[in-house]
Amino acid sequence: MKRITQNAIVDIGCLVTFIPSLITGLVLYVFLPEGSGKSASYLGIIRTQWITMHNYTSLAFAALLILHLLLHVKFFRNIGNCLSTVDKKSCEAE
């Protein structure tokens, strides 16, 4: 598989897991804050289920984010050269 395809799949995965993590986090923060009780619900889903969904999507996002960073190790190793060099074109394809 080409590197650009791998990056695209991981990046799309990051987006797909980030959005539900963000939404569940906002629901927990705005509509079901701590202290609202275990039986409190929003959209027919109780608070503990929102927490579970938030935890799983956040863990999946974190795992994909780590994979994303690992796919860009070469860039991170050369970032100093890319910032200090006059010829920026050698760093664009990283």
Image (cartoon, helix red, strand yellow):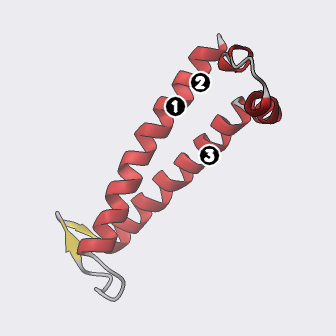
Given residues 38 and 5, the one toward you in this image is 5
Q: Which residue is mark 2?
A: 7
Disc 2 + disc 3, Cβ < 8 Å? no
Identify the residue at image location x=36%, y=83%: 34
Q: Amino acid at mark 1?
A: Asp
Q: Amino acid at mark 2?
A: Asn
Distance (Cα) linking label 2 and label 3: 14 Å
Q: Position of residue 43 (x, y in %)?
A: 17, 63
Disc 3 + disc 1, Cβ < 8 Å? no
Disc 1 + disc 2, Cβ < 8 Å? yes
Which of disc 1 and disc 3 is earlier in sequence?
1
Q: Position of residue 45 (x, y in %)?
A: 24, 65
Number of labels in the image equals 3
Q: Secondary structure at mark 1?
A: helix
Q: Which residue is mark 1?
A: 11
Q: Secondary structure at mark 2?
A: helix
- Which residue in the rendered view is the most extreme toward the left? 43
Identify the residue at image location x=36%, y=50%: 20
**Mark number displayed over residue 63:** 3
**Mark number displayed over residue 61:** none
Given residues 80 and 65, the one toward you in this image is 80
Q: Amino acid at mark 3?
A: Ala
Image-quadrant location for residue 29: bottom left
Give the mark toward the camera: 3 or 1. Answer: 1
Q: Quadrant of the N terminus?
A: top right
Give the mark toward the camera: 2 or 3. Answer: 2
